[in-house]
Image (cartoon, grey):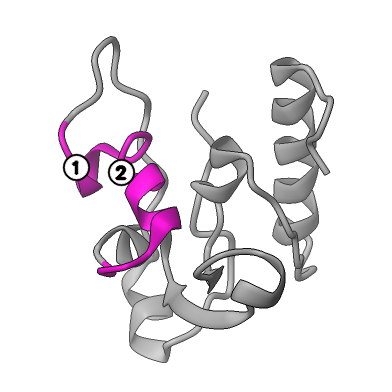
């Protein structure tokens, strides 16, 4: 949904996503924008290429888990925007996403939004 959007509009879209999730809705977003991908609670990485050369499940999990998956091209590029996954980027550090609380982790499911976008 971010093709052609100004970066400020992408942040507006992310805020709208977070409001929907906070109200108990689930979202399925197909996206290539790293600012959107890194805010996801769960990723499904398909590949290894597009079209006939794709469609295989490469990895699934949190953005951090995708970063640690060998062979994931998505994980390789996420390492540039998630300092926990790779070398720290140059410049000021962004505020990290909120981790799941102990209740959610113990229950194995999310009952409230786990991630907050960088401000």
Q: Quadrant of residue 49?
A: bottom right
Q: Residue 62 sits in which quadrant?
A: bottom left
In the image, which disc is placed on residue 42?
Answer: none
Residue drawn where x is 41% and y is 56% of the image: 73
Q: CA distance from mark 2 to mark 1?
A: 5 Å
Total marks in image: 2
Left/right placement of residue 38 relative to residue 9 reads left
**Decide: marks 2, 1 in contact (CB < 8 A)?**
yes
Residue 60 visible, this angle: yes
User: On residue 79, which mark appears?
Assistant: 2
Quadrant assignment for the N terminus? top right
Q: Is residue 59 left or right of residue 26?
A: left
Which span of residues is magenta-colored? 69-87
Q: Secondary structure at mark 2?
A: loop
The picture places residue 38, in percent across and down from the top left corner, at 49, 47
Q: Which residue matches tag 1?
A: 86
Q: Residue at x 58, y 75 (%)?
A: 111
Horizontal arrangement in the rendering, residue 94 relative to residue 110 (left or right): left
Q: Nearer the viewer, residue 102 or 88?
A: 88
SS type, badge 1: loop
Q: Position of residue 53 (x, y in %)?
A: 60, 74
Residue neighbourhood size for the residue with mark 2, other residues' Cα within 10 Å, grouped as few (<14), some (14–19), many (≥20): many
Residue 22, placed above or below residue 65: above
Residue at far top of view: 91
At 81% across and 34% down in the image, what residue appears? 3
Q: Residue at x 58, y 66 (%)?
A: 112
> In x, y percent, where is residue 66?
37, 64
> Residue lying farthest bottom?
107
Q: Is residue 119 magenta?
A: no
Crowding at dot 1, Cα within 10 Å, few <14 / some 14-19 / many 20+, comes out as: some
């Amino acid at each position: 949904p971010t093709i052609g959007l100004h970066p400020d509009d992408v942040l507006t879209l992310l805020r709208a996503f977070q409001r929907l999730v906070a109200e108990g809705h689930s979202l399925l977003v197909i996206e290539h924008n790293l600012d959107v991908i890194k805010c996801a609670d769960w990723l499904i990485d398909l590949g290894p290429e597009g079209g006939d050369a794709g469609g295989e499940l490469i990895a699934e999990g949190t953005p951090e888990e995708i970063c640690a998956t060998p062979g994931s091209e998505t994980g390789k590029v996420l390492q540039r925007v998630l300092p926990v996954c790779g070398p720290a980027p140059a410049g000021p550090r962004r505020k990290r996403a909120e981790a799941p609380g102990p209740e959610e982790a113990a229950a194995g499911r999310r009952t409230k939004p786990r991630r907050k976008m960088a401000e």
